[in-house]
Image (spheres, helix red, strand yellow):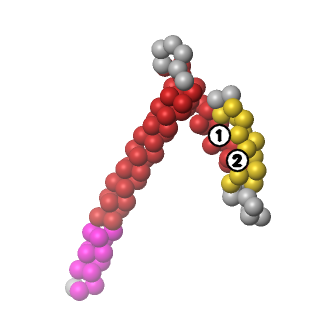
Amino acid sequence: MDNNDNLVQVDIFGQEYTVKAPANSTYITNIAEYVDSKMREVEKNLPGQQSPTRIAILAAMNISDEFFTLRNKQAEQVDRMEARITTLIDYIDKRIEE
């Protein structure tokens, strides 16, 4: 085990897991709590008893949707910033040439 790795006990959807990761234990615990809350949210919105595997897959899809949405928004913001920077550079270049 790497000296920078932490072993952290977490509870996700009623199951205990030992997680080994090169991050601080609070960060790992926060991630586990987020996954647990997403699984419980999915469970609450499904009819009847569902398997933990089905709930985990649907929660993973919801989390992935959040990730992709944020990534796309970030890419759009980068594109807008790059366009503005290009416009500013063009403006400065024209002023320097005058």
- Is 89 part of what is drawn in magenta? yes
Residue 54, given in percent of the width and then of the height, sits at: 50, 28
What is the residue that sits farthest to the bottom in this orientation?
97
The quadrant of the image that shows the C terminus is bottom left
Task: Name the side, left or right, on which 60 lies relative to 87.
Answer: right
Residue at left 54%, top 24%? Answer: 51
Task: Name the side, left or right, on which 55 lies relative to 14.
Answer: left
Q: Amino acid at mark 2?
A: Val
95 or 58, which is in the foreground?
58
37 or 81, which is in the foreground?
37
Q: Residues within 10 Å of mark 1 (few under 14, many from 20)?
A: some
Q: Element type at marker 2?
A: strand
49 to 35, vertically: above or below? above
Which mark lies nearer to you, 1 or 2?
2
Give the magenta-colored segment's residue range: 85-97
Q: Quadrant of residue 66?
A: top left
72 to 47, vertically: above or below? below
Could you tell me if residue 41 is visible in this image?
Answer: no
Could you tell me if residue 67 is visible in this image?
Answer: yes
Q: Mark 1 or mark 2, which has the lower sequence index?
A: 2
Q: Element type at marker 1?
A: helix
What is the residue that sits farthest to the top in this orientation?
48
Residue 92, given in percent of the width and then of the height, sits at: 29, 77
84 to 70, vertically: above or below? below
The reply to whether the C-beta atoms of the residues labelled 1 and 2 are less than 8 Å apart is yes
Residue at left 73%, top 58%? Answer: 5
Name the residue tied to disc 2: 19
Residue at left 52%, top 20%? Answer: 50
Which mark identifies residue 32?
1
Residue at left 68%, top 28%? Answer: 14
